[in-house]
Image (tube, grey):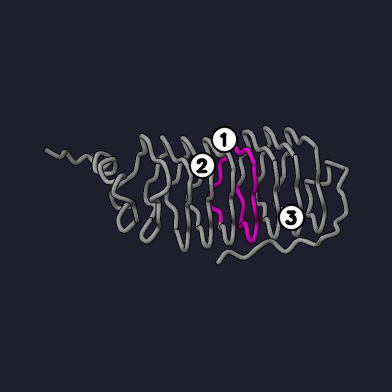
Amino acid sequence: MIKQPKVANKLNELRNIDLLVGDLMGVEVKSITVSKLVITNVEWNECYFKHVVFTDSKIDDLSLIDCIFEHCTFINVNLNSRFVRRCKFSHCKIMGWNVDKCDLQDVHFTNCSMQYFSLTNSKLRNTYFEKCLLQESRFFELQFNNVKVESSDWSESEWYHVPMKGIDISNCFFNQWSVDASSLKGCIIDESQASAFIRILGIEVK
């Protein structure tokens, strides 16, 4: 079971964008655009972001703990985070978001548009992708533990060295999916997907 973010009902509203380059605790950020910002070695804890646009920014060594992002947009953002824990992304647009060497635990993505999302060399524990669009995403060299995907579109995405044993992908869409055979071992599909996965593995059926 995924743990929910622990965010207080009453938060202080953050009005000064420049404060985003430092540690944040118990603040609400609403209806602002953050452009060309460089953020390094900070922690955002128990924060609520709504209708915030992050664009053309570089974020290094960021820790997200107990944060909620609703109707936020990330465009061309390089995010190198230490860890993301007990966070929820709801109805967010995440375009060209590159995440490398990150530890995600108790993270829920729901109704998010995540085209060109790139996740590499990372650990995912208790992570849930629900009703997300992940076309042309890239998942490389990942460690999975209790990862769930549901009603999501992974068309033209690439998955390599991603252990999917026990993961149910039967209600997801995978048109022109690129994946190595070792990653697929032990995953759960339905009968209608079987022929498509045979083609993915390069197997010909007479």
Q: Amino acid at mark 3?
A: Trp
Residue at the disc numbered 2: 118
Write down the quadrant of residue 93 in the picture.
Answer: top right
Label 3: state its secondary structure: strand
Q: Earlier in the sequence, mark 2 or mark 3?
A: 3
Q: Amino acid at mark 1?
A: Gly
Dot 2 crowding, Cα within 10 Å, few <14, some 14–19, many 20+: many
The spot of residue 103 in percent (x, y) is 56, 58
- What amino acid is labelled 2 in the image? Ser
**On the rendered image, what quadrant is the N terminus found in?**
bottom right
State yes or no: discs 2 and 1 in contact (Cβ < 8 Å): yes
Q: Position of residue 184 (x, y in %)?
A: 32, 52
Q: Residue at x 74, y 55 (%)?
A: 44
The range drawn in magenta is 80-102
Q: Residues within 10 Å of mark 3 (few under 14, many from 20)?
A: many
> At numbered mark 1, what does the secondary structure look like: helix, strand or loop?
loop
Image coordinates of residue 46 in percent, x first then y, are 76, 59
Which label belongs to residue 96?
1
3D distance between C-alphas at marks 2 and 3:
22 Å
Residue located beneath label 3 in the image:
44
Q: Nearer the viewer, residue 141 or 195?
A: 195
Image quadrant occupied by the C terminus: top left
